[in-house]
Image (cartoon, rainbow, N blue to C red):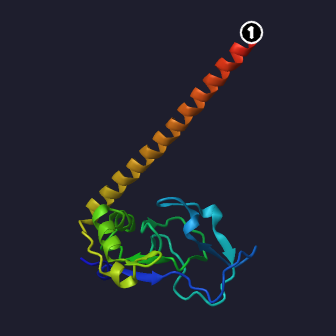
Amino acid sequence: MILANIAEILVGYQSRARIASIPGGTHKLILGRDFVAKGILDMDTLLTFTPDRVPDRGIIESGDILFQARGREHYAHCVENLQSNILASSTFYSIRVDQGIVVPQYLAWWINQLPAQRYLTEASQFASISLVTKSVLSSLEVEVPSIKTQKLICKTNMLVQKEAMFRNKIAERRIQLADALCRHHIHQQGMNR
């Protein structure tokens, strides 16, 4: 099944002028820099501004998938638990799925898989920056198993991500412990002189 048959693809917010941060603005804008790692969105860094035109259908909703269309990486991220009045910049497409057919988290996972990424890379236009056009993204083939299977894949993926996060924290703590032990040893040697 192609993506266009199971989802609507919206272009991110396009401004007529450079967007500047305005404290007390009416909207927030998701930029590429707000992703601290592939697929991890830091909601605390969003730019606050007031749009120069009414953002018609571009308001991001919970369950929308943000797809990074420009740049070296073309990852997808399912947005959940959002505040209101959030837009994505024009470097993103917002993918809004028919949730009776596909689970948003599953589709984001599918887009990030090697076969989809290979297709997007090969089909994107290369200039100074790689760009995946809306028509290329619309034509992406998506395997759509049962909703039950999709949810199982999502749960498995979430558990794998949590495990990776815990492993990273453990590795950081081991480094901190080793450094502290080394400093303690140096301090003890200095006292014994």
Q: Residue at x 51, y 81 (%)?
A: 12
Q: Tell me where residue 110 sits by quadrant.
A: bottom left
How far from the left and from the top, in percent, is residue 100?
32, 74
> How would you rate the neighbour count of disc 1 (Cα within 10 Å): few for under 14, some for 14-19, many for 20 or more?
few
- Residue 91, percent across and down? 51, 77
Q: Residue furthest front?
A: 128
The x and y percentages for residue 43 are: 60, 63
**For the point 68% across and 73% down, which residue is it?**
48
4 on left or right of 164: left
For the N terminus, which image quadrant? bottom left
Count of residue discs: 1
The reply, left or right, for residue 165 in relation to residue 7 is right
Q: Residue at x 42, y 66 (%)?
A: 75
Reading the image, the residue beneath label 1 is: 193
50 vs 155: above or below: below
Q: Reply above or below: 2 against 186.
A: below
x, y percent for residue 184: 67, 20
x 45%, y 68%: residue: 72
In the image, 32 versus 86, the foreground residue is: 32
Q: Secondary structure at mark 1?
A: loop
**Of the pair 64 and 185, the residue shown nearer to us:** 185
Q: Amino acid at mark 1?
A: Arg
Q: Using the rendered view, name the quadrant where residue 24 is placed.
A: bottom right
Q: Is residue 99 left or right of residue 181?
A: left
Q: Is residue 181 left or right of residue 57?
A: right
Q: Quadrant of the C terminus?
A: top right
